[in-house]
Image: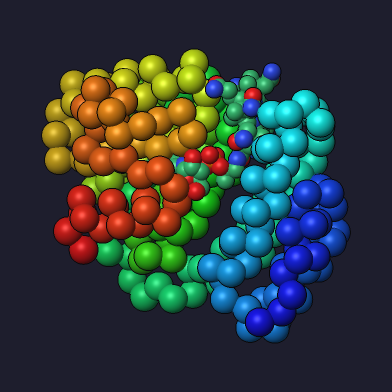
Amino acid sequence: MSDLGPLTQAIKDGDRGAAEAQTQAAIDAGTSAQDILSALTDGMDDVGRRFKAAEIYVPNVLIAARAMNVSMALLEPQLVKEGIEPSCTVLVGTVEGDLHDIGKNLVAMMWRGAHFGVVDLGTNVSPDDFVKAAKETGATLCGLSALLTTTRSAMRTTIEAIREAGLTDLKVIVGGAPITQEYADEIGADGYAPDAGSAVEVARSLANV
Ligand code: B1M
């Protein structure tokens, strides 16, 4: 396994070029996708801590997020490589009003790696767009992500729209920093996952695969 310290540092620094080079070097060295992913998230966690402590500001965070996205684009085929045929279709999106997508992208990548056919609807997805996509794809699962306490309520309205549309078999999984099991229960979600790793377990359990 290659030394992943420089990769974590590249994310902390928001250095896109170094992030790309270090990710590619780690892949070429045969480092596991999971280890590379951990190095990336360690870097982003540090960015989050410094942002919270007002040591850095929104532009720094954006730059780090872009570096992480460049690395994630390179890593995605490695995570997907283990897949044979997707076991079922899974929708994923960040709810209306919320533009955070790094955690949602991680969940989508982990689900792809677990052989789910992922349809990523992006960020700021309205309840109607979730319903429309569910009808079009015949999805089995729908993952909702929210990072803001102010957008948590969009999860409730999305679940209500899904139920009102008669999509009773579509299982909804919620997650994101301000979400708890208690809140998931309160809004009638079928599952809650605190992180991208457990999102795989929850999805497998709900989809019976
Ligand atoms: Co924002 N932001 N942000 N931000 N941002 C937070 C979330 C915040 C906690 C920072 C802080 O104040 N300490 C705070 C929210 C406070 C709150 O509501 N409680 C905040 C704020 C306030 C804002 C703005 C309002 C700032 C402003 O403009 N004044 C604004 C809102 C914009 C909007 O959405 N409408 C804003 C904007 C931004 C950027 C655009 C600059 C950027 C987003 C870039 C992007 O996503 N492309 C950004 C970032 C990067 C952050 C922090 C620093 C990092 C978030 C992140 O990507 N973490 C964050 C502070 C922090 O987290 N400490 C912060 C890494 C990621 C891997 O973790 O997303 O939690 P996370 O995902 C985890 C789990 O939560 C879980 O699995 C993931 C991996 O294990 N998970 C799921 C997530 N979704 C899941 C779905 C599942 C299951 C698990 O099933 C479907």
> At 49% from the left edge and 57% from the top edge, which residue is drawn?
109
In the foreground, 178 or 120: 178
Q: Which quadrant of the view contains residue 54?
A: top right
> At 27% from the left edge and 64% from the top edge, which residue is drawn?
87
Color encoding of the figure: rainbow
Question: What quarter of the picture does the C terminus occupy?
Answer: bottom left
Residue 51 image offset from top left, x and y in percent = 73, 32
Question: What quarter of the picture does the N terminus occupy?
Answer: bottom right
Q: Which quadrant of the view contains residue 7?
A: bottom right
In the foreground, 93 or 51: 51
Determine whether 43 is above or below 155 in the image.
below
Q: How many marks?
A: 0
Determine whether 76 is above or below 47 in the image.
below
Residue 63 image offset from top left, x and y in percent = 79, 41
> At 28% from the left edge and 28% from the top edge, which residue is drawn?
182
- Residue 197 visible here: yes
Determine whether 101 is above or below 24 in the image.
above
Residue 149 image offset from top left, x and y in percent = 48, 20
Q: Which quadrant of the view contains residue 75?
A: bottom right
- Residue 134 visible here: no
Side (left or right) of 138 relative to 58? left
Quadrant observed for ligand 1 in the rendered image: top right
Q: Which residue ends up furthest to the front in the rendered image?
A: 53
